[in-house]
Amino acid sequence: MSARHHLSAAEIDGLQETSYVHPLNANAVRLTRTLGEIAGLRNVGVHLVRVAPGRASTEFHFHHAEEEFLYVLAGRGVAEIDGREIPVGPGDFMGFPAGGPAHAMRNEGDEDLVYLMAGERRDGDVVDYPRAGKRALKALGNRHIVDYPKSAAAGGAR
């Protein structure tokens, strides 16, 4: 498929959503339309994400190698960043450099929370889930979840 460098709002609305349930949090369910791949982007993933009321976006985590950001388009939620809860809504931006801080978001409203999410797509990354006591090792398209190292757990979340 050749890259499409422009997608209209109608074309984006017509894209099929993919449901993703986080392997460490059954309540973290995202409905995602992937945009970056359609445009031929190889080094950054860009996604339009919808989280239903009562659901979370992900498990509390941080990436060691990859940076990511979220820009809220519609709805209201609560972002937890480095242990602080922050109400978020349309126009709010969150940026997470490699190495932390740990973060997650949940939809406590009565309408869908919709945001643009983008992040690096490196060949390798380590993702820590401090509350779950797990670490994800990502390399060349594979992901393995292992127990959180005791030395890292002693340091707590970033």
Image (spheres, rainbow, N blue to C red):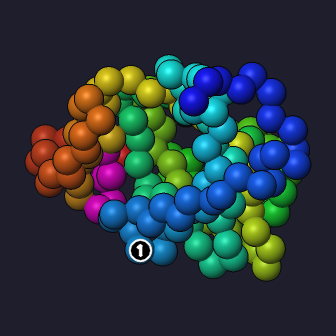
Q: Which residue is painted at 44% across and 34% down in the image?
A: 100
Quadrant position of residue 3? top right
Could you classify mark 1 by the number of other residues whose Cα lies within 10 Å: few (under 14), some (14-19), or many (20 or more)? few
Dominant SS in magenta: loop
Q: Is residue 152 above or below residue 97?
A: below
Q: Which residue is painted at 57% across and 30% down in the image?
A: 1
Can you name the residue that lies furthest to the front here? 1
Residue 66 percent across, percent down from the top left:
43, 27
Residue 129 in magenta?
yes
Depth order, front residue of 76/18: 18
Residue occupied by mark 1: 26
Q: Which residues are magenta?
A: 128-132
Residue 139 in magenta?
no
Kind of residue at disc 1: Ala
Q: Which residue is painted at 87% across and 44% down in the image?
A: 9
Can I make out residue 96 in this image?
Answer: yes
Residue 10 percent across, percent down from the top left:
88, 49
Residue 16 percent across, percent down from the top left:
65, 58
User: In the rendered picture of this protein, how many numbered marks are placed on residues?
Assistant: 1
Q: Is residue 108 above or below residue 101?
A: below
